[in-house]
Image (cartoon, rainbow, N blue to C red):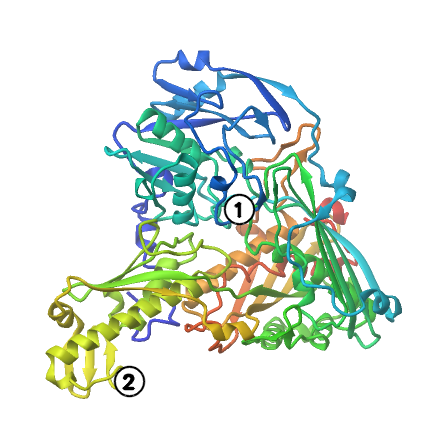
Amino acid sequence: MNAPNKPIGQPLDRVDGLLKVTGQARYAGEYPEEGLLHGSIVSGTLARGRVVRIDASRALALPGVVAVIDHTNRPRIASYDEPYQDADAADGSPFRPLYNDQVLYSGQPLALVVAENLELARYAGSLIEIEYEAQDHQTDLTILQNEAHAAPAELPKPRGNFQGEYASSAINVDVSYSTPVEHHNPMEPHASTVLYQPDGSLHIHDKTQGTQNCQAYVQKVFGLDKEQVRVFAAFVGGAFGSGLRPQYQLPLAVMAALALKRSIRVSLTRQQMFTFGYRPRTFQRLQLGAAANGRLLAVAHTAIGQTSRFEDFTEHVVEWSGMLYHCDNVELAYKLVPLDVYTPLDMRAPGAALGLIGLECAMDELACALAIDPLQLRLINYAERNENEGKPYSSKALRECYAEGARRFGWEKRNPEPRSMRTGRQLVGWGMAGGVWEAMQQKASAQASLAADGKLTVSSATTDIGTGTYTVMTQIAAEASGVALENVSFILGDSSLPTAPLQGGSFTVSSVGTAVQQACEALKEKLLAVARQTCPAFSGATLELVTLADGQLRLGDACVSLAELARNSGETPLQVQVTAEPDKKRRAYATATHSAVFVEVWVDEDLGTVKVNRVVSAIAAGRVINPKTARSQILGGVVWGVGMALHEETLTDHALGRHMNHNLAEYHVPVNADIGDIDVVFVEEQDEIVNALGSKGVGEIGIVGVAAAVANAIYHATGKRIRDFPITLDKLL
């Protein structure tokens, strides 16, 4: 293993990489069980109404079909909203699968066919006849946008006098942008394998970003004891937020397992992956007022987003406009329109990925109106403090991101005139944008256990959705404990392990990583206590005097192995468990990651096709635990940002209230041919306040600002300002 002495900061290969590339890593839909039943979900075709009749007789007549479960014959489930609330629930009344005859959106699960194999279950599902009573529906945000109501979000209070300063500004920009519905589409579809145990308890392998969240959900919805439900998620094939809430295949699988007292697997089809949460469609209006020298005098950002009729989904779309730049006069508003759709769901950099499109495109338009370089405009309005909170930043190296990103990109060679740069028949455009994401920390627990052979096992109930959690936690544990990397194992994805928050929001390393660090430090103290009692040379030793490295405790010339200390401790194994919480000193500061993104596009003058030729992404994220996995996170974020700019859009037939391109053939995402060179640079940023590791997380910041930078580059290349995303060739032509 490529592991030097100081594990943190090294580009360590993924410790779970071999398992994944050799097929040994099992995902939720891959756990075998003799006699395992298979469930296929029958989805509704109506956007709003009620089910009058379900005829499953033809399906039940097939040999091998075990049951058809619908709202008329399902097992007992909770009647009130509270049991269905989960750790990421939106305000309102959560969706309850098979609860009654009401149809709330197109694609809603209306029945579950259980059979001896998947193919039979799916065929039987096609034989089920459902009769509806249709009601008028509306799924188009455009139609109802004037009926929007204030979202239940705690927005920063207005500051200063926006209206007065905007009216008197030398330069005004008043522009609107729209972004489409986007679906998560991770490689692995959602699945739940419920293994029914002889004692009636359930072992559930689920695609989730929070095993304990799913455990609590199942426990409450079905009235089970906590000890009766254990949820596993050892490997997750991407999630991007889609696994933050328990998705409906989980309760349906549990229903069948409890009703039949059998083990069962329920997997969603790719089409059904479009029948739950998504990034919501938004309309955004930006009003910027500036002095002739570029100084911002007034900023207003209003966003309207869609939600379901049963929950008010809110995310932080507009807040960033009050913190990324210095301005004394700011008004922010976020409104919702309930539609006959499912509730939206957090998707990578929720809110920020959308809100920074509006803000950073508007800043580019302001730069053009002022005839000021877009980078210079951002420097003129650089914010030293988070003015939404009135706090200084614990650290902020955004200036360094601007400088290093511009240097590597060659920004000083940019001709500011649109359509002034070209190569052959290709118009060349250079655009840039800034990015910001909050650096959060949640309460988390971890256990460190040292065996008699000197091998260390550290555990927490977090998950690894492909971000490299297994690897970075191993690095943190190795450095904090002094145990060699090859002798450290990290266990996750099990609800019975020490408490961990949902994996999302870029706070796993800061939360669980801090708990791992503290657990290993507490273990060191126990080891030193054993050394004092059993080794005379260490009788007066303190942690400040000793060194722990490569599985050895050293004091001067004296040396004893950690394995020997574990054996002499009288505990088998020697272990500690700690709970880590954000340090109180954080309260006086704002904490955030920042980025600067520079993009070059080539636009075919005749065909309107856009090629993102190169991207430079400069990131300030505190201490980087593993540069290799962190770089991969930024690469993925940049690719997704290109997709937001040019490709991704869930298309809906509003007459039917149904998504049309619900497959990977027609839901366009970038492929290798769409992506040019991506240069990722992490600027130096020391932060002793954000957490003991000094790490801020990188899962979200990579996508923030990219779509805006692409759009700004397209304007520079063509002179055409496209404000309706994605920017497809028909809009350019």
What is the number of the mark on residue 544? Answer: 2
- Foreground mark, 2 or 1, reads 1
**Which image quadrant for residue 57?**
top left
Q: Residue at x 35, y 29 (%)?
A: 258
Figure quadrant of the N terminus: bottom left
- Give the camera-side residue of 642 and 91: 91
- 211 vs 622, left or right, is left
Is label 2 in contact with label 1 (beta carbons under 8 Å)?
no
342 relative to 413 in the view: left or right: left
**Residue 599 spot, x, y in % from top left:** 64, 63
Nearest the viewer among 490 and 570 is 570
Residue 226 visible: yes
Q: Determine the CA span between mark 2 and mark 1.
A: 46 Å
Residue holding disc 1: 89
The amino acid type, in three-letter code, at marker 2 is Glu
Circle 1 packing at 10 Å, graded few (<14), some (14-19), many (20+), is: some
Q: Amino acid at mark 1?
A: Ala
Say which of 100 and 523 sits in front: 100
In the image, residue 202 sits, relative to residue 348, either above or below, namely above
Spot occupied by residue 418 in the image (x, y as percentages of width and height):
78, 63
Question: Percent from the top left, x then y, of residue 93?
Answer: 57, 39
